[in-house]
Image (cartoon, rainbow, N blue to C red):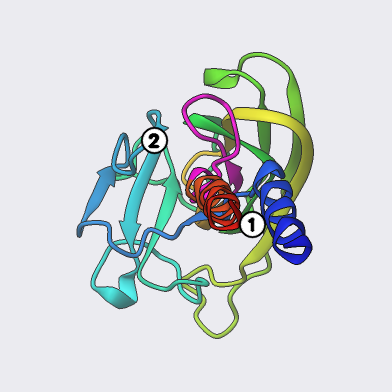
Amino acid sequence: MRALKTLVASTLLAVAVPSFAEPLTIDFETVPSGINAIGDTYDGFHFTANAWSIIASGQGGLGNFTGAPTPIGALFLSADPLQPGGPGDDPESVSFVINVDQGFTESFGLWYTSTALGFGRVQVFSGANGSGDSLGAFDLTPRPACIQAPTLVCNWLESSVGFTGTAFSIVVSGADSQFYFDNLRFGNLLDDGGNVPEPGGVALSLAALGALAWTRKRRG
């Protein structure tokens, strides 16, 4: 009886501790052919203008990149993806926002590659559309030339930022038509009420209470 009480108490204690959700990664591997506005393609994530999905040229698409961590598709930062600037241009900075309905905690990261003109920045905010407090940021810098394929960009770098608090948007800005992004990684996603999901917690609680009630009935 004592052993069972200890088991029930341990189970109730376990479900009282938040169970963090797994980080979520968007890898753009299932995007349609051509160049398409990402928009609301991914449930719960809303990409504003200047964020485009694009397929690598080696996969039959128009993206002049190769060697991505997931090689088929990527995210392209551009005000006009059908008329990208060339290496002799001095591209203006453009940006897009990723709004996350549920919010997320702990970290945000991505892989990126760029041309020699690729300067930019990623910022994480506590409110939608880049509002509220700035929770963290990291810079985007030009990547080395792709020696094995001079007409492409291929030197990818993983960058991330950790933060405290809850984030609801990310602002990505950089030189127009000079950046590709892949494997966007969001930290622990929250449920609609702003809490970390605890799948199975209620079921475990009921099971523990049921076991205790059954033991008492049997004893009586």
Assess disc 1: are there few (<14), some (14-19) or many (≥20) residues with their C-alpha within 10 Å of its C-alpha: some
| Front one among 41 and 121 | 41
In this rendering, position of residue 88 left or right of residue 139:
left
Q: Is residue 185 magenta?
A: no
Magenta stretch: helix, strand or loop mostly: loop
Q: What x and y, as percent, mark residue 57? A: 32, 71
- Ranked by sequence position, the earlier of labels 1 and 2 is 2
Q: Is residue 3 visible?
A: yes
Residue 78 position by quadrant? top left
Q: State the residue lying farthest toward the left.
A: 33
The vertical placement of 95 against 144, above or below, is: above
Q: Residue at x 64, y 49 (%)?
A: 19
Q: Magenta segment range?
A: 186-202
Assess disc 2: are there few (<14), some (14-19) or many (≥20) residues with their C-alpha within 10 Å of its C-alpha: few
| Front one among 12 and 69 | 12
In this rendering, position of residue 33 left or right of residue 52:
left
| Front one among 132 and 193 | 193
Q: Which residue is mark 1?
A: 116
Q: What x and y, as percent, mark residue 199? A: 49, 49
The vertical placement of 17 against 101, above or below, is: below
**Dot 1: element:** loop
- Which numbered disc covers residue 40? none
**Dot 2: element:** loop
| Front one among 7 and 41 | 7
Q: Which residue is mark 2?
A: 44
Residue 71 position by quadrant? bottom left
Q: Residue at x 51, y 43 (%)?
A: 202
| Three-letter residue code for mark 2 | Gly
| Three-letter residue code for mark 1 | Ala
